[in-house]
Image (cartoon, grey):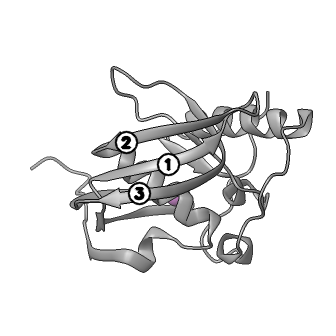
Amino acid sequence: MAIRNIRKEGDQILRKKARMVPEVTDRIKVLLDDMADTMYHADGVGLAAPQVGILKRVIVVDPHDDTTGLVKLINPEIIEADGEQIGVEGCLSIPNFNATVKRPEHVKVKYMDEEGKEKIWDAHGFPAVILSHEIDHLNGILFRDKSIEEVKYSSDND
Ligand code: NI
């Protein structure tokens, strides 16, 4: 268990395409555990390996809802997408920036779990947003690229 350093926008690694993971090794399991620790420590709902400087197709997601806990995904791939939703997003690699983004309402994601088994996640609503955002990271895409309008949060309450 370890907290890793989160790379920030401007770091060129965030713009590179991550590589497929051929098999689940102990090294990949440690990476997944560290990514989960790093995500929770930063109060995030998702994190992709390039954000901790590793160009491998690995993400962790926790939508913090009633039905889903931590999910670790290896080689995630969107195999179906439909509908649309527009919501406000943020990113641990782009501090103090929030903006609206259009995403599919539903995505079907195929991935490999920690045991090397193939799984499907049929995600709607917020989890579909997180999965789309994190899988974008694996292809060097940041949500700023797709942002429609910046949303400013006021720090005072008057
Ligand atoms: Ni992000």
- Toward which corner of the image does residue 54 lie, by quadrant? bottom right
Instruction: State the separation of the CA atoms marked 2 and 3.
Output: 10 Å
Is disc 1 in contact with disc 3, using a CB cutoff of under 8 Å? no
Mark 3 residue type: Glu
Residue occupying the far left of the picture: 158
Mark 1 residue type: Val
Number of numbered labels in the structure image: 3
Is disc 2 in contact with disc 1, using a CB cutoff of under 8 Å? yes
Disc 3: which residue = 80
Disc 2: which residue = 123
Specify whether residue 95 is in view.
yes
Question: Residue at (56%, 47%) from the top-left corner?
Answer: 110
**103 or 20: nearer the viewer:** 20
Question: Residue at (38%, 52%) from the top-left corner?
Answer: 107
Instruction: State the separation of the CA atoms marked 1 and 3.
Output: 7 Å
Question: Residue at (67%, 58%) from the top-left corner?
Answer: 51
Q: Is residue 95 above or below residue 16?
A: above
Q: Secondary structure at mark 1?
A: strand
Q: Earlier in the sequence, mark 1 or mark 3?
A: 3
Note whether ligand 1 is within 8 Å of mark 1: no
Disc 1: which residue = 109
Q: Secondary structure at mark 2?
A: strand
